Amino acid sequence: MEKRLPQSFLTWAYDGRKKLVQSIASGEKISREKIFLGFTRHSPAVITDGPAGLNGSIKGVGFIPKSGYINDILAQFIKHIDSGYDESYSQRGLDLLIKLIWNDEARERLDFTRLVTLELAKSHTWTNIQDNPRATLLFFEPPVISFELRCFVEIHTDDIIHEFVNAQHDVYHKPDIPAWGKRPAYLFKIEEIYDNSATQKGFGNRIY
């Protein structure tokens, strides 16, 4: 049976981010403050411990499709990347992300029990995770919303997950396929979620 994450977290992490992405793609005028607050859903502090010491690093995370959908979505990402970089590239990429990831229909294609990111620095987080595959993702949207995700971490290189995470990044950003080999992917398998919000239902309440 498929594990279902708490709706309170999904409403904040997915639905709120989806609305922001769709608004940006449509050209809606959004204040800088609203954009910055909205992107707290994208950029948790990744807390690790190991040979590099107890460490926190802000990283952008994303969702990944279920195994039955990943090949098709990856193929569409690659087709866009191969179309060539021009002034319309990022907008076309954003439209593709909305079609495949950020809409109500796409929810059924996503595995919300896993999050992914790229390792771009290979510094403290990289050193720690190779020795200790445990991490906490700490999200905070001022002034009160916070979620803590405790995860088991897999490092992926030279496989479909590694290719997918790099392609998903380069669908919007200027593509750099030769760099993919230097950018390992992390797969965070969510084991526990705590609501750390400063609310009646928060303050470290375990919700998953």
Image: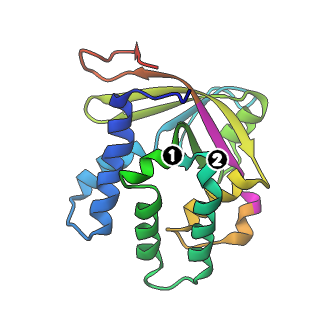
**Residue 155, image x and y in percent?**
73, 42
**Residue 114, image x and y in percent?**
57, 38
Residue at image point 57% right, 61% down: 73
Q: Nearer the viewer, residue 124 or 106?
A: 106
Direction from residue 66 to residue 206 in the image, left or right:
left
Residue at image point 58% right, 84% down: 84
User: Which image quarter: residue 166?
Assistant: bottom right
The amino acid sitting under disc 1 is Leu
Say which label, 1 or 2, has the lower sequence index: 2
Reading the image, the residue beneath label 1 is 110
User: Which image quarter: residue 54?
Assistant: top right
- The part of the chain drawn in magenta is 181-189
Indicate the colouring scheme: rainbow
Q: Where 204 sits versus 31, above or below?
A: above
Q: Would you call the spot at circle 2 few (<14 residues within 10 Å), some (14-19), or many (20 or more)?
A: few
Reading the image, the residue beneath label 2 is 67
Quadrant of the snapshot with the N terminus: top right
Residue at image point 32% right, 37% down: 11
